[in-house]
Image (cartoon, rainbow, N blue to C red):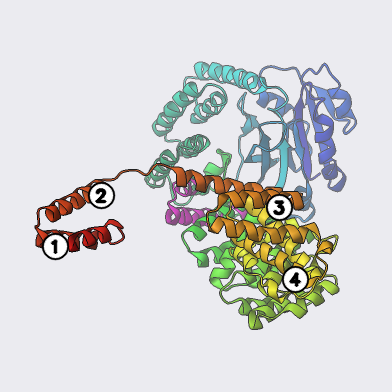
Amino acid sequence: MQLSIGMIVKNEEKYLDRCLAAIKPILDSIDSELIIADTGSTDSTVEIAKKYTDNVFHFEWINDFAAARNSTLDRAKGEWYMFLDADEIFKSCDDIIHFFKSGEYKKYRSARYTIRNYDNSDMKHYSDILSPRMIRMDGTRFEYAVHETFQNFQAPTKILDDIADHFGYISDGDLQKRKSERNTKLLEERLKSEPNPPALLYLQLYQSYNLYIEEKANYYMDLGMKKCRELKNYTVLIAFYGEKAAAYFRKKKWDEIIEIAEEYFNLPEDIKPGTLGTDAEMHLLRAVAFKALHRNDEAITDYLEFFRIYKSIENGKLQSPDMLVYCFAVAVRHNLANALIELLECCIEAKKYQIAAQNLKIVKIPELYDRPHIKELMREEFLVMTNTGMYNRAGQLYEQLDDEGRLLLQAFVRSSIETNENPLEEIAYFKKLYKNDPMLSALLNMLEEHFKTGNAGALMHKMIADGYGAYYELLYFMLKESVDITPLLRDTFDLHAAAVFCRNLFDDMYDTAAAYDVDKQNSPEALLSALRVFETIMQIMIEAGKDINAVMAAWAKAGSRFCETVEDLDSVPAQALGAAMANNIIAARKQKNYKVCAAAMKLLLKTYPTAKPIVAALTKEINKELADTNKPKQVTEMDILAKTVKENIKQLIDNGEFQQASQLLDEYAGIAPNDPEISELKLRMAQ
């Protein structure tokens, strides 16, 4: 038999059925058995267990987890043994199954997989540990009444990809505290009863107290590190360093992480001989700290070291003793994607795009893009591509992303082209890449013509006629080339969404709209379309608190142009008539004739009520202008000095001292040439 799976249970009906259903593929696929020791359940736990195995027995609880685990070991017949808890549910067991079916298990003596510990029921917050759970049955036993572990968990160790979700601490708010109190009591009893307690006991006490009494945990941290040095148990000492750095990490104490990492990496060789597995944890923790402090160059170095060491761990080349004691909290496979994204962010901020490009392949594309922040990641990818000219990554992304990811990729391709200093070079590359995508090929042809000649109107209209009018940026390019927008504005086109999209994509969207040449629109339909676009753009400008006056002027001109194209003014729609009336508002405001301006706005609202947001924005601006106009002028020191100088000039003139008066007047005119009293003073002196 290849594998025995052992469990100890008590009142586990909440999760047990899901737990056992999740491992059933293992039991069905490989030569294996399931052994369950019940320590006194009073619910339906035993009945559930018997649905999956006949090997269910009672074990009298003696406050010793190792003894309970060993009772399942005593019944095991497998070449390998694996243990799990009833509140751990595998997402998939595929890698475990492959490990045995492929014969790979023959090369190893032990294996780990990821336990994902959830903090709350929404499953949004969790931590991962790479836990030692599988071992060859070569006389192995469990030891320690609490935090039981294998006595001889030996290298080489296989790192398995499978993940087991652990829900043990979210069903009851006090459960974690109760379990920790139980554990610390048992551990304290053992500490008192043993004349020479092992160093690992202090680490277990720290870990248990750390869940609910920080002060006590810190006491055992300091005492444990001291005992490790006395006992020369440097394997556990290394684990303490990892725990201490992780504790600082949880509290975001960045300087303290850097300090403890520095101490760790400078340990003498007899304590830290060469590269250890814990180095990966320390490099990653310090990288995060450096990044948080915007020390990007140092963060990049640590991220790269983390990836180098982790790769050695994953491929089995690094199997140090500390990995059998300390379950990494940060340097685990699940965090590779996060670490790579953070490395990209540091490289981009430090403008080290080549380093970013060289390390993008660390994490497989599907795994990397299984993220909640896919847009931010795609943006970073394209920043790297744009600044290195290495666009082959776009091809790899297109081949490996799902349909939703490809749509997002296409959007970033277009964005990259449309905002690049050398768009034609990118277009040439992407035309080859997307030659089998009709919609994107059509857009690329249009963009190529636009950037070559600035006259792609015919291709834009062809795209719309061919059914490719869903690209929102067509709105921008039609405005840019003053093309008739009417064909784009069909019933299914979301103009507001398109305007917002273009505003976000193009920095000059508002200026482009204001510069749209309405004189080139020779039909009433084209002018009405322009009016509709101008109103939509003014709406989003008002929402963003932007000055609408330039676009309003284009709107008003389009309204006037429409009135010029029809013979019967009575047939002019309110939309065009209202826009034409805006010319009166603009003229009156320019002349600061606010009374006429108010009357013109009132008439506009009566004619075209839809313009209410525009009038409201204008009213706000005009009220501000009026407030500034009516504000009392503040007397400055210069005003007082000017008044004194002019009084002195008048006194000199009255005294007949014309030469001195003329000299002083010339000096004053050089300082305040626009003062209207200068002319009066010269005339007075001439008389």
Check disc 1 and report the residue beneath it: 663
Disc nearer the start of the sequence (3/4):
4
Q: Please give left or right for residue 262 compared with residue 642 in the image.
A: right
Disc nearer the start of the sequence (1/3):
3
Looking at the image, residue 306 lies above or below residue 659 = above
What amino acid is found at the position of numbered circle 1 in the picture? Gln
* Circles 1, 3 touching at the beta carbon (< 8 Å): no
Q: In which quarter of the image is residue 316?
A: bottom right
The residue carrying pointer 1 sits among few (fewer than 14), some (14 to 19) or many (20 or more) residues within 10 Å by Cα, namely: few
Q: In which quarter of the image is residue 493?
A: bottom right
Residue at 65%, 65% in the rendered image:
554
The residue carrying pointer 2 sits among few (fewer than 14), some (14 to 19) or many (20 or more) residues within 10 Å by Cα, namely: few
What amino acid is found at the position of numbered circle 4 in the picture? Glu
644 or 556: nearer the viewer: 644
Check disc 3 and report the residue beneath it: 604
Please provide percent x and percent y for residue 260.
41, 40
Marks 2 and 1, how far apart at CA: 20 Å
Marks 4 and 2, how far apart at CA: 54 Å
* Element under disc 1: helix
| Of labels 4 and 2, the one closer to you | 4
The residue carrying pointer 4 sits among few (fewer than 14), some (14 to 19) or many (20 or more) residues within 10 Å by Cα, namely: few
Check disc 4 and report the residue beneath it: 564
* Element under disc 2: helix
62 or 573: nearer the viewer: 573
Please provide percent x and percent y for residue 594.
56, 50
Instruction: Give the magenta-colored segment's residue range.
Output: 286-314
Q: Please give left or right for residue 262 compared with residue 677 in the image.
A: right
What amino acid is found at the position of numbered circle 2 in the picture? Met
